[in-house]
Amino acid sequence: MRLARPALALLLTAAALPALAHTGADAGTHHHGFLAGFMHPLTGVDHLAAMLAVGLWSALAARNGRELLAAPLGFAAMLLAGALMGLAGVALPAVEPMIAASLLVLGLLVFTRRRLPALVSAALVGVFAVFHGLAHGQELAGESDAALTLAGMLAATVLLHAAGIGLGWALRHANRWLPRLAGVAVALLGAALLGGVA
């Protein structure tokens, strides 16, 4: 419980940060190289909330190891796939709305602790992860160190999933309202982004 409260406070505080992850504000030299890629999910509020929520939901809802790892692994794999699509010049409509929708859906899943079969969990978060990755792949297209940047981003993604899982395990049998508050915070962030408020 000592670890859970600071982690939850970090998640809730992040919801108040400006969401600059895909607006082009961080494009250019500050967005290239392993370290920049690693730092990006930690400083972009939409990524931070999404990655933590995937791990948190997995830990809260899973009944076995397969269910616990399905969503985090599915998200990481499809994030990479989306980034590679973006690097190849693939464009999909509604990238920003889908990123915002991912937060709304993930927040609701955390709030309800809804358990889904492992493959369904992986597929659901995987669809959203494609859009998260696509946004970055498009930003990095033509850059010589794109692979290093993506490697850093993927490493941070896995780390944030692990942090979310740790938080979820800490809260799983502790206090039923703390995970619900975290879910509400993530869902509200998604709704605000969808509405153009944030």
Image (cartoon, rainbow, N blue to C red):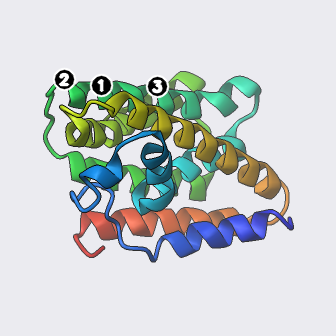
| Residue topped by disc 2 | 88
Mark 1 closeness class: few <14, some 14–19, many ≥20 residues within 10 Å: many
Looking at the rendered structure, the kind of residue marked 1 is: Leu
x and y, in percent, of residue 30 in the image? 33, 54
Per the image, label 3 sits on a secondary structure element best described as helix
x and y, in percent, of residue 191 in the image? 34, 66
Q: Mark 2, mark 3: which one is toward the viewer?
A: 2
| Residue topped by disc 3 | 77
Per the image, label 1 sits on a secondary structure element best described as helix
x and y, in percent, of residue 119 in the image? 53, 22
Residue 198 in sight from this viewpoint: yes
Nearer to us in this view, 5 or 32: 32
Q: CA gap, disc 2 to disc 1?
A: 6 Å
x and y, in percent, of residue 43 in the image? 46, 61
| Residue topped by disc 1 | 84
Q: CA gap, disc 3 to disc 1?
A: 11 Å
**Comes first in the chain, label 3 or label 1:** 3
Contact between marks 2 and 3 (CB within 8 A): the answer is no
Per the image, label 2 sits on a secondary structure element best described as loop
| Total numbered labels placed on residues in the image | 3
Q: Is residue 50 left or right of residue 72?
A: left
Mark 2 closeness class: few <14, some 14–19, many ≥20 residues within 10 Å: some
Q: CA gap, disc 2 to disc 3?
A: 17 Å
Contact between marks 2 and 1 (CB within 8 A): the answer is yes
Q: Quadrant of residue 189?
A: bottom left
Q: Is residue 182 left or right of residue 173?
A: left
- Quadrant holding the N terminus: bottom right
